[in-house]
Amino acid sequence: MESFTSITGTAVPFMRINIDTDQITPGPEILRGRADGYRSSLFARWRYLDMDKRTPDPDFILNREPWKHAAILLADRNFGCGSSRESAPQALRAFGFRSVIAPSFGGIFFSNSFRNGLLPVELPIEDVRHLADQVEASGGKARLTVDLEAQKVTGPDRETYVFRAPSVLREMLLAGVDEIDLTLSRAAEIAAFRNQDQAERPWAYRPRRAGQAH
Amino acid sequence: MRTERTFFEKVWNSHAIADLGDQTSLLQIDRLFLHELSGSAALKSLEDEGRRVASPDQVFSVIDHAISVRPGRGPEDSERVGGIEAIRTSRTLSKALNLTFFDVGDPRQGIVHVISPELGVALPGLTLVCGDSHTCTVGGIGALAWGIGSTEAKHVLATQTLPQRRPDTMRIRFEGSIPLGVYPKDLILHLIGTIGANGGIGYAVEFAGSAIRSMPIEGRLTICNMAIEFSAKYGFVPPDDVTYAYLAGREFAPSGADWDRALAYWRMLATDDGADFDKEVVIDCTEIRPQVTWGTSPQQVAAIDGRVPDPSAIEDSGMRELTENALRYIGLAPGTPLEGIPLQAAYIGSCTNARLSDLREAAAVLQGRKVPEGFPAYCTPGSGQVKAQAEAEGIDRIFRDAGFEWQESGCAYCGGGGADRLAGKRVISTTNRNFEGRQGPKTATHLASPATVAASALSGCIADPRKLLVH
C-alpha cells in the first residue's frame, strides 16, 4: 500500500453526480494499459475524441492547463459508483491524482482507493461546491491541502474542513503497510477461529461435489 | 437489553474473527469466486508475490467476462482487448493452484452470479465475495455477498479473510401483489428511481415484505443484483422454505447429515421480529407499472406510459446537469413519450435477467411472433445449465423463430466485450447498467424486464408487454 500523509496541489473542479467507474476506466481499457498504470485509460471516453486513436478532446477539462496537473479532484455526489474495477482508482493515481473530494462515494471504489494510494475524502456538498468555486475563480492557481494525519482539508482561503477517514484504512495508508502481512500476523487467531467455526459449520469449509464421499 | 437481531447482524457477528476498531472487523470469508476479468489480476499478483492460497477448497473460478458468447465459440475466443491473455492466466493459475474451476465448455460454466446459486456454491449464511460489483446478486439465496477489488481478492486468496467496515442496515419492504406484466426487474428499477443511485451508500440492505416472500429465488436474485445500482454493496433476502427447496440437491450444497445440520442452522438466521434497522423503506407493489430507463443511470427511469423529463424543471443544479448530460448522450428530447421510441437492437442476457424464468417470461411474449426483418436481437442464456434446460423446453426454438440469435453463456454484451455489434445503436436490454459506453461505444441502453424487451423487440420500438400478454 502506497503511503499518504499530506499533499498540497491543484484541484480540478469536476462537479458531476454519479461519475461511475465505467467512465473513469471504460470497459475496453480494463485489460489494456496496465503498463502505464492505466494513466492513458483515465476518462478515456470523455478525454479523447477517438478512444482508439487517443486523439485528445481539447474541450475536456483534464486536457487543459492547468487542470491537467491537478493532484486533487472535486466531484459531486456518488463518485465511483458502479463496477468494482480497480483500474478506476489506479488510473486516477497514475494520472497524478492523490485525492478525490466528494460528498459521497461508491463503496467498492472507496475501499479500492485506499489500497492504491488514492485518498477519498467525504465533505458536505456545500463545502465541495465552495472549494470548486474558489479554484474555478482562481483559474487553477489556488491550491488545496489534504492532510490525512490531521484529517482536514485546507482551502485557498485558509478555511479548514474536517473529514473522517475509517481509522483502520487511515492507519494503513499513513504507514503504507502491506495489508496481507498485517493480517497474516494474526495467523494463530485466524486458525483458532476457523477450527471452532468449522466444527459448527462444516459445510462452509468443505464444499463437496455431488457423488464425492464425505 | 435488546436481544432481537437482524439477519445481517447474525451473519456478520458469526464471521467476525477480530475487532480491528472503528466498526471494522476481520471477517472469515467462506467463498471466493474469481472470474477472468478481475480474478486474473488477483491470481497473477499473488503468484508474483510468491504467496500461497490459504484455503483452495473455498475458492471457485470461472471464465465468463471476456469469453465470446457467439454461437460455436472456441475456448479462447474473445472480442476484448487483452481477453485471450486474461482467459489463459485465469485458466492456468486456477488449475495450478487447485481451485474448483469451471472452464469454457464445462456444462456448468456460466455467468458467475448465475452459477453460484445454481451450483449451490452460494448458500444461506455464507460470506461470499467476488471481484465484481454484482456479487450482491447472490444475496437472493440468503448469503452475505459483496463485490470487492482485485487487491481485496488477493487478500482473500492469501488469508481467506477480509477486513470490512460494518455498514448500517436498511430494510426495504415490497408489499402487496404484483400486477400482471410487472416483474422483479420492474420492482427494483422503480425502487432505484425512487431512492436514487446513491440511496444505498453505506447500507446493507435486507429485502422483505409480502412480495419478496412470495417471490421465487430467481426473482429475488434479480432484485438483489441491482442493489449495487443504488450503491448498496450488500443486498439480501434472508433464507426461508423457498430457499431450501431451491438448494436441495444442488451440486455443491451440503447433503445427507450435513444438509440436516445446515438446515437447522439456516432456520436460525431470519431477522427476529422487532429487530431494529437504521432505515426502513416501504414500496407498494400494486402501483408499479413496467419500467424503462430513459437516461444513463438506472435512477433515470419511468413507467412505460411515462415521458422523458424536462431538465429545466429541476431545481438542484447538479441534478439538472445530470439530466441534461444524460439526454445529450441518449439522444432524446424532453417530453418524449417512452412508448414508441424507435430501437435498433434488443438484448436479453446478463447476471440480472438470463435465468430460466427470465427466458420463459420473454418466450411467453415472443411465442408465434417475429421481430422486424433485419432487427438485431440477441439472447444469451446465463449459464450452460440454463441454456440446456431452455433447449429441453423448446424455448430456444421460440427465440430463434422470432428472429433472435441464440448465444453461448457469458457477460460479453453487458460488460463491453463483443460490444461492436451494439456500437452506436439504441438498445433495449435486460442488463443492469445504462452507463455511457457500457454496451459499446455510443450505445444508448434502455433497461427493462425480459417481457418488456421481448415486446419492444417485436415492435422495433419501446413497447408495453401488458398489451401482448394473454389475460
Image: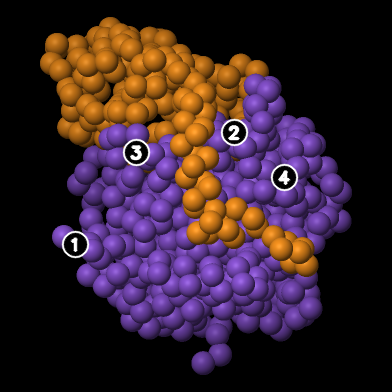
Chain colours: A orange, B purple
Query: Alpha carbon of mark 4 to alpha carbon of mark 1: how far?
Result: 42 Å
User: Regarding mark 1 in the picture, which secondary structure is present there?
Assistant: loop
Residue appearing at x 37%, y 52% in the figure: B13
The residue pinned by badge 1 equals B2
Which amino acid does the dot numbered 2 rest on? Ala
Mark 4 belongs to which subunit?
B
Identify the residue at horizontal 20%, vertical 46% (top origin).
B315
Q: Which mark is residue B99?
A: 4
Neighbour tally class for label 1: few under 14, some 14-19, many 20 plus, Cα within 10 Å: few
Q: Secondary structure at mark 4?
A: loop
- What number is the disc on residue B158? 2
Above or below, A179 relative to A176: below
Which numbered dot is residue B19?
A: 3
Sequence order check: which comes first, mark 1 or mark 2?
Answer: 1
Going from N to C along the chain, the mark reached first, 4 or 2, is: 4
Task: Measure how far apart labels 3 and 2 are at the Cα level.
Answer: 20 Å
Select label 4 or label 3 by which is in front: 3
Q: Are marks 4 and 2 in contact (CB under 8 Å)?
A: no
